[in-house]
Amino acid sequence: MKEKKIIITGGLGFLGFSIFKKLINENYVLVIDNLSSNIIEKKFVTNNKNGTFCELNITNNSIIEIIEQYNPDIVIHCAAQTNVIESMKNPIKTKNINIEGTRNILESIKNLTNCYFVFISSGGAIYGEPKYLPVDENHEKNPISNYGISKLKGELLTKNILSQSKIDYSIIRPSNIYGPGQKTENVIPKFIKLMKMKQEVRIFGDGSSSRDYIYIDDLVEIILKLCEKKIGCTINASSNQETKIIEIFNFLKKQLNYNLQATFLDDRKGEIFNISLDNTNLIKILNFNKFTALKKGLIKTINS
């Protein structure tokens, strides 16, 4: 993929910035971000001759004119309030960013004639408590957090608005993303940071809850393959390797020579106990099946 005009919303975030770094050498990329943090990433964007930065919240209606004028070939919509617990504490903020902000992006591109749109949804939140594992794309959608509800509504907006347009689009439902550069509010980098500092590690629940994880480089490659082929689909993006939280704790503990025991706390409202995603459609559609093994990805993250 070369010499495309690409917009990445939330382009200074963990996923958005990882995509930017892969695209910028051979494409022109406009990053739209509210700059809530990530000053170093902003400098990287602005210092690159192919990169342009726009400091703007996606809830601001002026974003519609900005995107229309840029006339992108591809829009990758990563911007979101992604914290489940924060969504339960502040549902209005979550709704404004994840639903109304998404509506703004969709309104800005619906009249374009040669644009491809990628909506980053959530595989870990929109399905709710699973009826079976691994969860495929046809599983009922019954989110139990405001974050999950907002992402599901974002999906519905994408389908409703773009089905009346000439825009091809994909909806990606990632499992838990991890890798070098992720903020420490997420479980894996938080564990690593606390263990390196020899501080107490707290686990919500008894440690038996499970997730599947996808390494950041794998997810970026999946997204770029979709953009290159302009495939219209709704797919889970996961390694389909279900792992308990306590297993991750124990592996990191051994790697980092951490001698303390975990402190277990009550479960938190809005979080799903067990979730793993079926990646059969992903493998079939993209012929992609080279997922980074979790232990290998954890070691890369530790050493970054």
Image (tube, helix red, strand yellow):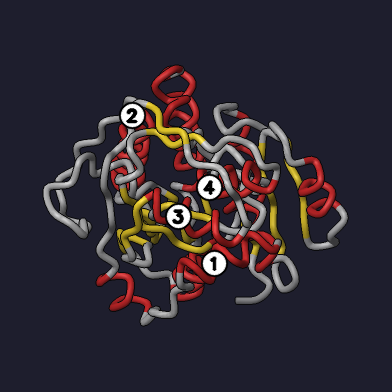
Q: Amino acid at mark 1?
A: Gly
Q: Residue tagged by mark 4? A: 78
Any part of residue 8 in sight:
no
Marks 4 and 1: which is nearer the front? 1
Q: Amino acid at mark 4?
A: Cys
Chain-order first, disc 3 or disc 2? 3
* Label 3 crowd bin: few (<14), some (14–19), many (20+), radius 10 Å: some
Q: As displayed, is residue 180 above or below residue 259?
A: below
Rounded to the nearest angstrom, the CA distance separating label 1 from label 2 is 27 Å
Q: Position of residue 110 (x, y in %)?
A: 44, 47
Q: Amino acid at mark 2?
A: Asp
Quadrant hosting residue 54: top right
Q: Residue tagged by mark 3? A: 248
Q: Amino acid at mark 3?
A: Ile
The residue shown at (54%, 67%) is 297
Q: SS of the residue at dot 1? A: helix
The residue shown at (49%, 32%) is 101
Quadrant hosting residue 18: bottom right
Q: As displayed, is residue 216 above or below residue 39?
A: below
State the mark number for residue 297. 1
Q: SS of the residue at dot 2? A: loop
Marks 1 and 3: which is nearer the front? 3
Chain-order first, disc 4 or disc 1? 4
Marks 3 and 4: which is nearer the front? 3
